[in-house]
Amino acid sequence: MAEFICYGCSAKVRTGEKFTFTKKGAVHFDCFVSSRRKEVPDDKTETLRSLSLLLDSQLDHLMDILAIGTVEGSAGDLIKEKYKDVEKGAGETTRAISDL
């Protein structure tokens, strides 16, 4: 597995930790939301809260899918496809948070 360094706290991102990618690179979920909370204008804090909850849920879902493990055949193909769908959604949510 690839190793990444969180640009928020400079610590290694470990397997099983919630993280995402922005234009700056890999970042822990908590580091990302914390930094955005400091930068987002007051009138967008509720939007940030809602999007952060959504991203947290998406990252939990990704970790749950990974916990299924290796599955052979058509079921495995479907699991990979669904993982990519959730990963894409998490990326879109991350982008929305970054754009606030």
Image: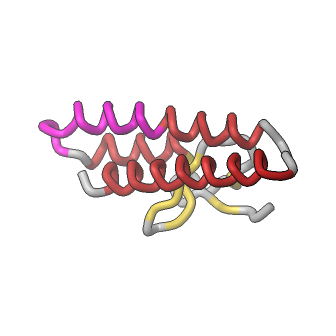
- Answer with left or right where residue 51 lies relative to residue 26: left
Residue 17 sits above or below residue 7 on the image: above
Look at 24% across and 36% down and name the residue there: 47
Residue lying at 79% horizontally and 37% vertically, measured from the top left: 68
Residue 2, percent from left and from top: 76, 64
Q: Which residues are magenta?
A: 41-55
Nearer to the camera, 77 or 8: 77
What is the basis of the colouring in this image? secondary structure
Extreme-front residue of the structure: 74
Instruction: State whether residue 43 is above or below residue 94.
Output: above
Please tell me whether the stretch drawn in magenta is mainly helix, strand or loop: helix
Q: On the rendered image, what quadrant is the N terminus found in?
A: bottom right
Q: Is residue 54 magenta?
A: yes
Please give the name of the residue rendered at 70% of the width and 46% of the height, measured from the top-left corner. 79
Res. 26 image quadrant: bottom right
**Image x and y of residue 70, in percent:** 85, 47
- Does residue 72 lie above or below 47 as drawn? below
**Is residue 64 within the magenta segment?**
no
The residue most toward the left is 43
- Determine whether, in the image, residue 44 is placed left or right of residue 93: left
- Above or below, comparing residue 62 to residue 50 in the picture: below
Q: Residue at the location (48% across, 49% down)?
A: 90
Q: How many marks?
A: 0
Residue closer to the observer: 11 or 77: 77
- The image shows residue 11 at horizontal and vertical percentages of 66, 53
